[in-house]
Structure formats: C-alpha cells, structure tokens
Image: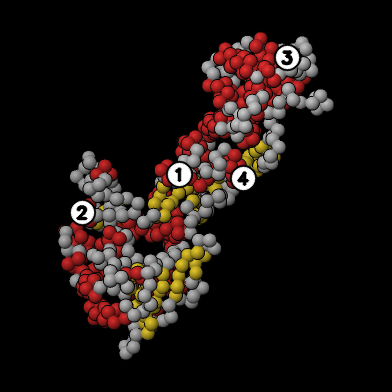
Amino acid sequence: MIWECVEIFKRELEKNSDKFVLDNYIPKDGTYFIIKIEKDNWEMMEPIDITYDKKQERVEGEMNVYYEKVCFLDYYSKLIDMDKALDRAKKIHSNNYLSFFVKKENLFNGALTVDIIKKYYDVFRNLNTKYGRSPESKKLYEETEKLCGQTDIDLINSIEEWINTHIFKILKPSKEKDYLKLFFVFPDWNKTKQLFIQEGTRYFIPNIYNNNKYNTDGHDGKILGLPNNNLQMNGKKPYLGNMSRKNKAPFLLDREQVLLQSKFYDYLEGFAAKGKYDVYFDIEKNKIRAYKSKEYPGSGFYGYYIRIKKGKEVEIQNVDVVVYYNPNLRPAFLYKQILEVKESQNYGSITKRKDLENLINEVFFNKGLMANYFTEPKDIPKNDPIVFREIVEIRERLFAWFYKNTDMDISTVLIASAWELIKNSFKKGNWTKTKHQLNLKWSLEDYFNSNQKKEILMNEIEKNMFRYMKEQDWDFKNDEEYYFGVGQMASFLIGKSRSAKKPMSFINIYLSAGNDQVIKEQLRTLFQKYSYDISYTDWRVKSLFSHLMLYRPNGKVNKEMIIAGATASNVIYKKEEED
C-alpha cells in the first residue's frame, strides 16, 4: 500500500521536480554560512540562523533571500543516517567535500580535531578505498563514478585548507548543540547546483541501500538492493529476513526505485518536522495533504492514509485505505442530559467528528486519549490504571473511527469501554462525573441504535418512582425500575452515615453482587445499621424498602440501573410540590 502512495508522490514529483520535496524541507537548527569560491579571495557571506519555532509553527530565517538556496544545498549534503557517515569519528555530518557540518559544541570541546578533518577529506581524495571493501560496494561505486565522474582533487585540497584556517575562528565559544554548516559555492548558481547534485548523488547511490551485501543483479542488468528507509536488517533483527531463499532480503529494488523512495521519505520528514503526522493521499485529486493532531481532511476524501513519526528518521506507524471520509457526523450526535447534573457540560447537538472526539476524550478518558493515540504504553501516564487500560485497548479503533471513517463495530467496543470507565468513576465516589459518563454512554447507545431510546426509558422510570412515593398500592413494573430503586435506597442509607467520608464500599458491594439475594441482604444490613436515624413517619423510606424486599427480578443484576439510581436525584427527598 505504501507504493501506491509513492506513485501519487511520483506524479507530483514529475510535475514539480525536486522543488516539490524542497518546498517541504526544513533544515536543522543552526547557523549557516555560504562561502563563495573566487580565484583570489573566498568571500564568506553573512550568516543565516535557522530554527523551527514549534509554538509559532514557522521557520525563523526563512525570509532570508538565501534561504531557498540553503535548503537546496543542505538537502544534497545531508547524511542518510549516522551509520553511513563519511567521517568515521562521526563529528562531521556532511556527505560531500563542498559542505561541512559540525555541532557547535564540538568546535570548542576538543571533539573536532585537525586529524579528523584530514581523514574526512582523505575519503573524497580516494573514494575507491572507501567503497572497495566488498565486491558489492565496489561494483556500485564503479557505476556511480561512471555517472558522476571523478572528484576534483585540487578543489578538495583548497577547501580543506580553508577549513583548517577558519573553522575554529568562525564562532565565539559556545556549548550550543545545534549546527554550524558551511557551503562552498561558485558565483555561477547553475554550476553550483549541478555540482552539489553530482556530489550528493556520489554519496547517495553507494549508501542508499540498507546493506550492500544484499545487492544482486536483476534480469535487466540493474543492481537490486534492500532499501534503507523504515527497515533495518542486521544481526539483532534476523527475523526480518526471508529465510526461504538464498538472498534473505525481504524485498529488493533497483536504483531508480530506491532513490524515489528516499525522496518520498524526505518529503514525509518535512511534515514530521512540522508536527503533521497524519498524511492523506487523495487518489481522485492526486494530491497529498498532511494534518496535525485534531485536524481532519475535507469531505469526500478517498485514498490512502499514513501515520508518520519523527525519530532518528521518519517512521511509518500506520497505513490504511480510506474509502470515503466525511468530517461531519451523519446524522448529528445528540448529547442528552438524561440524568440531571447541576455542573455544566456541553450537552446538545454535535455535528463534527472532532467535537465528538473532544467530548469522548474529556468525559471518558480525562483528556488522556487524544494525546496518546500512538504513545508507547510504557510512556502513557498511569495515574488511573483503569483509564490507562481502556486507552490502550480502544485507542486504535477510536482513531480509525475519527480519522479514517472506519467503523470496525465501534459501537460495541466503545460502549463496553464506557461501562468500565463508569464503574471506575462510581467506585471512586465521583458521582458527578459518573452521571456525565452515563449520559454520554446512553446518548451513544441511542445514536448507534435508533430503536433504543434510553432517554424515554429513564424519564419513565424516574416519573414512576416519583409517583410511587405518593401512593400506597403500587409495584415495580420491571427489573429496571427495581434496580434503580436499589440504587436510590442504598444512596439514601449511605447518606445517613455521620462519617465525613462516606463509606463508598457499601455501594461497591452491590456492583459485585452475583444475584438478587445478596443485594437484599446488603440492603437489610444497611437498613438495620441506620434504622436509629429513620423516623417511623418516614413512609417513603418504608414504602420503597418494603417493595424492594418483596420484588423478585427475572433477569441478571442490572448494575447500570443501580448506579443510575444511586447518582440520580433521590425520590425520598423530593418535595411534594416538585412531584
């Protein structure tokens, strides 16, 4: 599926050339110098300080007239990764003799030495030695040299001499960990561009494959190898190999394919640097769009989705097909206040996926879901073990529902998870939160199942319970009313406790009860314990308690109705005029 995305990228690349990648490219933070190569005097231009401001979401330095040129020079001078550095000491991070990248701190802490600089330029003076250590690497470089020609030894020597003379004097002593980057250019920009492309290619082609030992000849004479992006084949990961054939590489690509894939990952890295990790490839419009967290593609999107992550290199974490995406909810979702809650909440109609996502994130997951869709479990805060567990179990499906319009029976898993979170809040004594969560759970049930109207059911139960408190001859109509009454009575009796901290363990007993007999026994025990504080004239208490003792439910213990009864307004306390 990734190659389908690469094909869309390829079409855009063919229309816009490398500018398509460079427009999305962000150089690393640092100070950049351009040195013009003249016959008699090499001129160092004014420095350009480049940093990416994550808060302002912009590049400091991009307004400089030389910024685009710096992006071009930097792109063709960067390393594929540190394991493929030309400097064996890994202090110089550029890939050709026309550029020189070093961490600022290494200029002043003794890490960069004249000997390291000499060995760096020795590599370019004799690249056959560098790439002649194995038959596969040697063959690949011989092809590269045919394409790029031989290096300019005199120019290499001149640049090395300039570096040795100036490199330790350019900046004031600093412990900064960003870069100092130098580029040696000609007055003729076209000549400079061609030379940087040539010398960048001289580095890229021999190093573009993961490991040249897997290289082999294709049927058409082209060299095939294992690409380097998003895959590592080494002694620590033998399981990635294909053990059923002589060449154990899982797949092989020719040079053109690998270079295309490398540019594709460079393009994605630009998005990752900006915090745009959700990338959508539109099949119909042949467009690529990337979004930050909490951002959504437009209506009618059809294509591929890629989730990326910025690490040492850009990583692809998730790939999927999006058949038809709509950021609007059809039909609209109605968050109903079925149980009355005094504390405010965003009850009402919701028409956007992002608003429903925010609501679920806040009410159920204490705002911990959206920040941890792709966080490693070990790095997710574990302040509440139940919330942590539910985030890990359901986040993948919720993300697919919100960002890829994929249902995957989301109603079943979401309702099940909501119930676990409701029990968790209830057992902790957070009844206000419990009511908000119950309201959201019931609203979701009504949304997913249009035939089920929890609002009507609960209104009828509460209305009947209020009416029962005024009558002498009555009985529960169903198990829902009965278990709602259990919650009401248990809540009332616990309220009689004179302890500053109410004993919530009494309520928890009802949630763990396996049958109605246990519930009745617990109610009797609680009633006897606080009977001293119940007046003989409290006919509502006596009426509700006696009917609870007489009723015989048919089904399983309805724990949800117990919680609803315990947290709802208590009919025993309700004033006559309110009735």
Element under label 2? helix
Q: Is residue 407 above or below residue 222?
A: above
Q: Are marks 2 and 1 in contact (CB under 8 Å)?
A: no
Q: Earlier in the sequence, mark 3 or mark 1?
A: 1
Residue at the location (41% across, 65% down)? 28
Q: Earlier in the sequence, mark 2 or mark 1?
A: 2
Q: What residue does disc 1 label?
A: 380
The quadrant of the picture occupied by the C terminus is: top right
Pick the front one: 336 or 423 = 423
x and y, in percent, of residue 332 in the image: 66, 39
Q: Earlier in the sequence, mark 2 or mark 3?
A: 2
For label 4, the crowd category at 10 Å Cα-Cα, with few meaning under 14, some 14 to 19 and many 20 or more, is some
Pick the front one: 302 or 378 = 378
Q: Are marks 1 and 4 in contact (CB under 8 Å)?
A: no
Residue at the location (65% across, 22% down)? 493
Q: What residue does disc 4 label?
A: 355
Cα gap from disc 1 to disc 4, whole angstroms: 23 Å
Q: What residue does disc 3 label?
A: 543
Q: Earlier in the sequence, mark 4 or mark 2?
A: 2
x and y, in percent, of residue 422 in the image: 57, 31
Q: Is residue 473 above or below residue 237?
A: above
Instruction: Check disc 2 and give the amino acid type.
Output: Lys
Residue at the location (72% across, 14% down)? 542
Cα gap from disc 2 to disc 1, whole angstroms: 40 Å
Q: What residue does disc 2 label?
A: 213
Cα gap from disc 4 to disc 2, whole angstroms: 52 Å
Q: From the viewer's perspective, tell me whether residue 471 is left or right of residue 390.
A: right
Camera-side mark, 3 or 4: 3
Element under label 4? helix
Q: From the viewer's perspective, tell me whether residue 33 is left or right of residue 235.
A: right
Residue at the location (29% across, 78% down)? 163
Instruction: Check disc 3 and give the amino acid type.
Output: Ser
